[in-house]
Image (tube, helix red, strand yellow):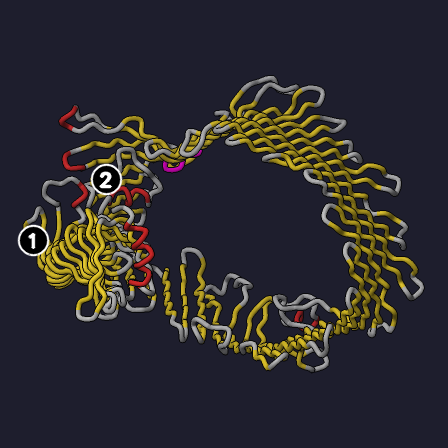
Amino acid sequence: MRWLPLLLFLLLPALAEERVIKVLEAERLELRQEGGEEVYVLVGEPVRLEREGEALEAKRVVYFRERRLLLLSGGVRYRDREGRLIEAEELQVDLADESFDALEVRIEAENLLLTGPICQRAAGAILLERGYATPCASCGQEVPDYAFRAREIVLYPGDRVVARDVTLLVQEKPVLTLPVLLLYLSERRPRLEVGQDEGGLYVKADLPYVAAFGLGYTLLRYYQGRGYGFGLDHYGTGEAKERYFFLHTPPDTFQYRGEYGLKRAGFSVAALVERDDTRERLTRFRLEALLPGTPTPQDWRYALRLEGFLDHDPSTPPPRTLQRLPELEAQSPTLRQGPFSLQLSLQAGRYLAETNPLNRSARALGPYAEAGRLLLAHTESLVLAPWPGATLRGENRFRGFYYTTQNPDGEHERQVDWRTSLALRQALGGVSLEAGYLRSVQEGESPFRFDALPQRRTHQATLGLGFQERPLALSLKGGWDLEKEAYLPLEAQATLQDPGYALTLAHRRGLEGEGPLETRLEGSLTPFPFSLRMSLRYDHPKALFDPLLLQGAYALPGGSLNLSHRHDLNGKGPLTTDLAYALREGPNAYTLQARRDWQQDLLALQAQAILGPQSLSLQAALDPRALAYQAGFRSGSVPGPILDLLLSGRYQEGFRETNLRLGLTQALPEVGFRLTANLHLPEAEDGGIYLKDATFSGGAELWPPIPAEEGAIPGLSFSGSLSYTRRPTSPEGYSLALRSFGPTLTFLGRENTKLHLSALLTQNLPGEPLKPRFVLVLDRCCWALRFTLDAQKGAVGLAFLYGGQAAGLLLSEEGLKLGGGR
């Protein structure tokens, strides 16, 4: 019965109507009528369904078409769009509102296991009644280190968990009862930290809370001898996207960020306020409100924008960024009435921005100034066919900028961008006649740099005559410049075009005594697989030819060959000749680019050969003085290892500047690093071979830890970055820069327990005494303790982290990846 998926794929779009259900596997299909409603029954071992990123499995699936209900039973597995796996005995899904009900449920979500007898989903949130939850399920512990039972557990989108009437369990024994508990599964970080730095003792605590208007953390800080800090980190749980963060630390450092976003079909709002005194003492804010939120072409559109900053440090100059304080905009849809269309827009605002340096009155305001602006824009267009063969097109586009600033004469400043065009075309067989009118003006001055327009004025009437009868096309165009009261140059063009060839001759001649202005000739011949092209232009007033361009190409199977040549006809002779070759044969590819610069007597060459996982490259430049070269070799592919070798230098009465650069990269979980080194090779002025510089960054596990029952041998790894530079003028002859570089010992205990001991250096050597930072981490997979002793800062810290794979995430904040940590 494996033919059923094809039949079901044809039937079930009618079942789901709005969202298609794909049946991937089933063994039997039954069609029924129950109470006047169509019912589809699928049976299989199992039945497998897919629906817009969701996967469902069950032994029996029943679909009620009118009510749009999906009932699954027997070994139900449901993976939703957020990656959560829901297993149940029975599952009922309402396809109309995405809600479901389930019995005897097991949920796996971001390293948290939840179980319970009854489960429901509504508005994206999953409610588990009389539930049990633990993050230790995947840690291999016989008895979870900690878990909790609750009257109800709510799993929100984004993996926020709120539980009420909670009993905390340690080793499955009740130890504490709480009215409410909050977890963030995807944003775990240390919630309690005690330590000592150069200023004395400090304590940091992040205490969770849940309220009717949202959930988050209360941030408490204490610094010995410096005072208290406080703040909050709040998330809204409603329809809008809300995140509010505030933190004050002594003596007067503020950090806050508020985000709000709500998008509906009728309107949308997005707002942001942020300040971080550790970077700059500014409060930046931004607001945008749109009506409607999802516009259609028939809608009027309205917008409110507010953007700027507050400067809290008058001793430093503020940034000269554009500020809208505020800006209002209204825009009409394209209004149509027969052949006529109209669109209007109005924008009004007050701005702080950089001033226009070309405007004298703006320069007097200083480099950064404030002014109001009104921008009025409208576009009208007309398309008519007044009689057979005739087409009339007209367009008027206007933008007017009006400012509150005044020029030296006391008038308010303005600038205008106004363009009007009209064209009437009459076609009679192969002959066409076209009359046109164009007026384009950009004038006035703006006090701002960001919207200043260049001065431009065009006013002309044109008349064109054309003839087209394949393969011949002729055109003649002239006109009158109404601005200068003079004839426009006469433009004539003849084209002969057919498949396989094309030839174009164009000529421009002035009618005000200038005589010939320009003659241009272009031709092409394309007998497959060849392609030949030529172009030439002559500037009559200067009595000079533009370079003659000759191009030839040959289409190869799987590649191409191109040759081009530029030749000066004014006495200089040949200019450049270029050759390009490309060929691909399965996994192999070859490219070659060569250029001959005849004027500079220079020959440049680039070549590359890709031979599966290996590649060779060559770059060379030969002039009368020297030969410069680079030869490269690469071997390997991701994840590695990948070896890169690059030999470079210059030959000028002997080898000079000769270097061999080596690169080695690998991205495996056990060994991930990047190593680069630069080796000096013998040359005419220095015959020595020595290492000029080298850099290592990454980490490597030298050997994994062995558990106690097999010998209790600790694992050893190292990580960080190290840079070596040769310095022959210094007493030591070299320098080392270390950044979080050092070894890590990993001891493996029972039930996936790990103890990491790291000694890390961040300093420059030699010349500085060693001041390592020691990090001791006890990792129980679902919780971790970290003890830090920093000899360089004179600081001690103790931190606690809960949640799945705690130590791995904790140490990633330090920029480290420890061997033995999975």
* Type of the residue with mark 2: Val
- The spot of residue 103 in percent (x, y) is 13, 58
Instruction: Identify the residue at image location x=63%, y=76%.
Output: 379
| 711 with respect to 401 (left or right) | left
| 243 with respect to 545 (left or right) | left
Q: Which residues, given as a range, are shown in magenta?
A: 737-741
Does 477 appear above or below 171? below
> Nearer the viewer's eye, disc 2 or disc 1?
1
Instruction: Identify the residue at image location x=86%, y=63%.
Output: 490
Dot 2 or dot 1, earlier in sequence: 1
The residue pinned by badge 2 equals: 777
Label 1 residue SS: strand
Q: Residue furthest right?
A: 513
- The spot of residue 799 in percent (x, y) is 23, 47
- The spot of residue 319 in percent (x, y) is 53, 62
Q: Residues within 10 Å of mark 1 (few under 14, many from 20)?
A: few
Instruction: Identify the residue at image location x=80%, y=64%.
Output: 466
The residue pinned by badge 1 equals: 175
Q: Residue furthest top?
A: 687
